[in-house]
Image: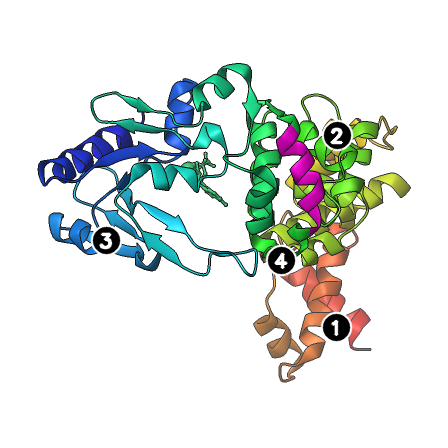
Amino acid sequence: KHPAWQSAHDVMETLEQHGHEAVIVGGAVRDYLLDKPANDVDVATSAMPLEVKALFEKTVDVGIAHGTILVLDFEEPIEVTTFRTEGTYTDRRRPDEVTFVRSLAEDLKRRDFTINAMALRRSGELVDLYRGQEDLQQQIIRAVGEPYARFSEDALRIIRGVRFVAQLGFTLEQETLIAMQKTSHYLGEIAIERVKAEWDKIFVSRAPEKAMYYMQEYNLGEAIPGAFEAYTKWQNYAAKDAKWGWTYWCILTNDLTLLQQYRCSNDEKSFVKQAKACYDILLQHQPTKFELFQYDLKYWKCAYELLALQNVTKVISYPELVKEKQDLPIQHVQEIAVTGKHLMTWTNQKGGPWLREVLDEIVKRVVNGQLENNEQTIKEWLQNEWFV
Ligand code: ATP
Ligand code: MG
């Protein structure tokens, strides 16, 4: 068990001792029943947010408007959320208002899927008002309540459902799936960051292709950028053990605009662009020494994995490439024996764009083996060839 379970128990004990109801809810209960390690252990309570705050020494108001307080009194931080209902969703994103309630049943009713709508008391008693346990056993993802209404009020639940399919390998219940199909266009109204977060979980799940299959076959991906292309490419190329991700997705669909569309981080963008550059090089020609120098091994490795998926014959094997790269005169720009300072002194000139230009040329020549990486040699070359 995750150490957070003990902390959650400690939190619940305190709340109960003060006459409040407290339970573990959501994903932790689901994962516990599946015998899987929990992501996070959340506590729900009948105590109002201010009552929760008053009972613990160290708390952080992480989402007090929505009733969530982070309790830091124990080994692991625990999120404690007051039982609540959600009012209408006029924008299909966030409820117009949340109302705190004293009833656990009310709280469970607002949850997305039956397998996520169970609660566990400290005594070990399971509160399962929507046959979540049965659905867990049957491996079914089923909406709580009237599916069409639930997906219409919050379309994120559609891709969450698809994500659980991928993570758990479960099947979408018929009525739930039909309602998802009818409401999938609303997904276009959901903040793209939230959709991306679901993709990130899908990518590292046990069955990403299952999620993509649902998006394609049932049109659930109509408002999700790149979803259809992803499935097609996956089918054509993917090996069973391929680790799908942004890089694979963007390169295989040849669509770097996905990075922009999903507001990917600069790190993600940079990785994909460099891996794509290596991939394109390998498709066309034997990498030059300078190209080998330019890109880190991790990008080449990724490009090789992608080519392997497509059974493309490589111009050079990966081990050969690694060796060629290691045999380059230098591995990093910093290893060049001269600096801008040297250049300015030798030429008696002030800094400026010319410095970058000359340094780049030196790096290129050293990498290509045309110039020895030695202060004196470089100085002579500079005086003879550059400033003639
Ligand atoms: P994970 O393992 O990814 O944490 P989770 O089920 O715990 O999965 P969370 O996003 O942590 O997912 O949400 C916790 C719980 O809150 C869910 O189990 C579910 O009961 C409820 N929930 C989350 N998002 C929604 C939503 N959009 N609509 C209804 N209920 C939701
Ligand atoms: Mg969770």
Q: Residue furthest right?
A: 284
Helix, strand or loop at mark 1:
helix
For this view, does 31 lie left or right of residue 168?
left
Q: Find the magenta span and give its range.
A: 175-185
Q: Which mark is residue 383?
A: 1
Pointer 4 residue Cβ closer than 8 Å to ligand 1: no
Q: Position of residue 221 (x, y in %)?
A: 72, 43
Q: Amino acid at mark 3?
A: Pro
- Verify CB contact (< 8 Å) between mark 3 and mark 4: no
Check if residue 283 falls in the magenta segment: no
Crowding at mark 3 (Cα within 10 Å: few <14, some 14-19, many 20+): many
The residue tagged with tag 2: helix, strand or loop? helix
Locate residue 87, reporting x and y percent. 44, 55
Q: Name the residue beneath numbered marker 2.
A: 318
Spatial CA distance of label 3 from label 4 is 34 Å
Asked if labels 4 and 2 touch by Cβ distance under 8 angstroms, the answer is no
Determine which residue is flagged by label 3: 49
Q: Earlier in the sequence, mark 3 or mark 4?
A: 3
Q: Which mark's residue is nearer the viewer, 1 or 4? A: 4
